[in-house]
Image: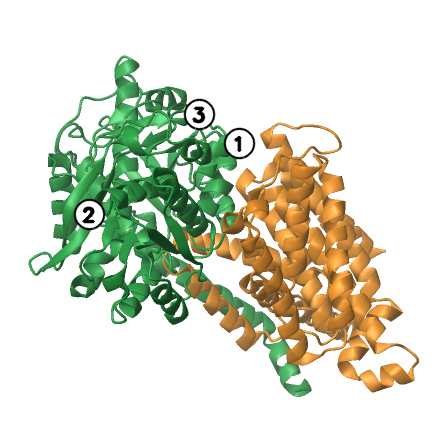
Chain colours: A green, B orange
Amino acid sequence: MRKSHIVVRSRGIFAGMLIGAIILSLLAACAPPVTVPEAGMGETPAAAPAAPTAGAPSQVKIGIVTFLSGPGSPFGIPSKNAADVIVEALNAGQAPAPYDQAGIGGVPIQLVYVDESGGPDKQVAEYRRLVLDEKVDLVLGYVSSASCLAVAPVAEELQKLTVFYTCATRRIFEEASYKYVFRTKGTDLVYNVGAARYLLKVKPDLQTIAGMNQNYAWGQDSWTAFRDTVLQLKPDVQVVSEQFPKLFAGEYSAEISALLVARPDAIHSSFWGSDLEAFLIQATPRRLFDQSIGVFIIGEAMLPSLGEDVPPGLIIGAEGTHGALAPDNELNRWFTRIYRERYDARPIHPAYHMALTLFGVKAAYEKAIAENGGKWPTQDQVIAAFEHLEFDSPSGVIQMALANGHQAIEPMAFGITGEFDPAAGEVKLTDRMVFPAECVNPPEGMKGEEWIAQGFPGAKCP
Amino acid sequence: MRPLLITVALLALLAGLGFVLPAWIIFLLSLAFARGLAILSVALLLRAGLVSFGQGLFFAASAYTVAFVMRAWGVREAALATALGTAAGVLVAGVTGLLLARYREIFFAMLTLAFSMVLYGILVKAYALTGGSDGMAVATPTIAGLALEAERLRSGLYLLTLSCTAAVAYLTFRYMNSPLGYAARAVRDNEVRLEYLGLSTWGTIYLTYVLAGGLSGLGGALMALNVGHVDPQLAYWTTSGEFVFVALLGGIGNVLAPLGGAVVFEILRAYAFKYAPYIWQMIMGSAMLLIILFMPEGLWTIYTSAVRRIRIRRWSWRRLG
């Protein structure tokens, strides 16, 4: 023992140098794919020579933060893929109208990626690095609500335009108001209000409901919003079971047994990622969905991966009108085509969320350029243009209507799983129904809970 | 005299860096020092032969205390919040220590882990109070009664973190070289002999544990103030595991080794994030592997072997001259 220590000590310096060299070479080996950004098409000559914007910088540098590793990566990687193909096409000026001007106002976009793993404190440090060291012009990102809640005050402190792309917590704009923070999609509230409304449309004689949600903020928020909406719309409905298994538990036999015994008419679930697939694979053979309707508010993401194994008759949502529930417009056809050509897969809803932030930012910048007499705008002018903006997207028209124009409202779509479609490799959704944004979103200045409790004042439903 | 001069110079240098280095590095250093205190507490226990996989318990208890007193009592003063947070760390250690001081080895490690996971569970489940897994915001603090603007606030928090760390590092150094500090080391070497010397093993471990709880608590409070957001992840076992990881990476032979390890770890991770966003975990893992293989006493080995080399050279010169 002691001898080996002495031997090792005398080699200490060399060992240190060796480790240093290895780490450096590792870093160097990893550097090229990142320092030459995959999507940064600065070198590629823009196909459509745009009108030069006066005072424009040589590039718009965007920091993109999403899960590149860990359990969040089934959402993060498709989002990153979407950012890559869209920015490449935008820089080449190959996107359809109204986004056919190259880059942003003729200025190429460069992307810098950051992994969202490591917890909110790590994300705060990385955010500061993106803004102060990488000197990005804006930051797009964040899947986890905890990251969004931690980063929002820092964005305000560093005064940097920041657009949240898929985190859903309503607490961000309900608990504070921000000047530099935007979100281009709806909150957890509206998915669940929409799901409850859809369920009551397809099953007006609903008697009993049950919940199957992950035991963390998203699962709890989703379940309370859904339960309260159902009870508000049809007060005689009974809640027969509330299951809260732990996040990423992966094994649900006890909960499935409890649900089988409770025999609810409908089971609400906000499951996502591997949990969602595991639950479906375990529940289907036990015929849980033969006796109860499954309501999966973000079940859309598992349609391509589970393919034929998705049982018929489930109600499926996509956090809005995205993915399999997206409208048939030109931007959507274009987006799904370029995505499929590159990755041989259909973009799922997180990819659409990423598309929304990119199109929203491009629309805001170009509106600000127009309002600034064709000159490159300041960040404050971009923010002013972004507030209350309405922009086209593959998911339809998005309105920045709430929180002084910083929070988007979007329509909600739901469908029911039906026949397997071998050509698409996934089951088809039938009975697609869209609720307009004014139907499922609370009016400006009203908290979600109050809105449900007061019976949805101001809601305009068909 | 010389060590004192070197220490003062090092402190002045670190404080001066606060005005020179880019703001994001300053923030990174603040985080490194805050974590470094928790890592130092792990190293203290390691010196007594006890592996704690639950230092996140005090870290999180203190961080949440800071968030709570700011929300509920309207406390804004950073120093007061830090003191309350540290007190929470000491209190939690004082209670759990009553049980834990009876255990050694894997049982001690698993029980510390269990306690921190209990707190994690409470923080996640007490949704209405703590915001569940999303965590809660920490209000903007004042420093010495002054409400500073954003940039000044960061420098202020850095100086606060640095001075707390320096003061505590000094006290820990004094403790390690005191009879009590040696008693803790003796626990690892020979408990029976310690009892024969008339010292209580239980008491020694209990005191070391409470001290470690306070250190970790101070780190947690500084962490909460710097980040501005607390979440249950702070009590999760991976956070505590990381503390053990960095304690081994830095070395446990000296007060400065774990703190230096924390700085190296934080900077290595930041650059791994920057240059290899897809494989940063692999880089951290390789670094750990190499250090375990070549430097069983951590990065501090580089310093000790350098000192030894210089001494040998001097000695040989003297002989020759």
Q: Alpha-carbon neighbours of circle 3 within 10 Å: few (<14), some, or many (≥20)?
A: few
| SS class, disc 2 | strand
What residue is at 17 percent from the left and 39 percent from the top?
Answer: A89
Q: Quadrant of the C terminus of chain A?
A: top left
Kind of residue at disc 3: Gly
Identity of the residue furthest to the left in this view: A423
Query: Is the residue B275 above or below the residue A160 in the image?
Result: below
Frontmost residue, A387 versus B315: A387
Give how far across and how far down residue A460 sits, in percent: 28, 27
Q: What's the residue type where badge 1 is placed?
A: Glu
Where does label 1 land, which residue? A157
Q: Which labelled disc corresponds to residue A415?
A: 2
Picture disc at residue A445: 3
Chain letter of the residue beneath label 3 in the structure image: A
Q: Are marks 3 and 1 in contact (CB under 8 Å)?
A: no
Q: For residue A260, say whether it is visible.
A: yes
- Mark 3 or 2: the one toward you: 2
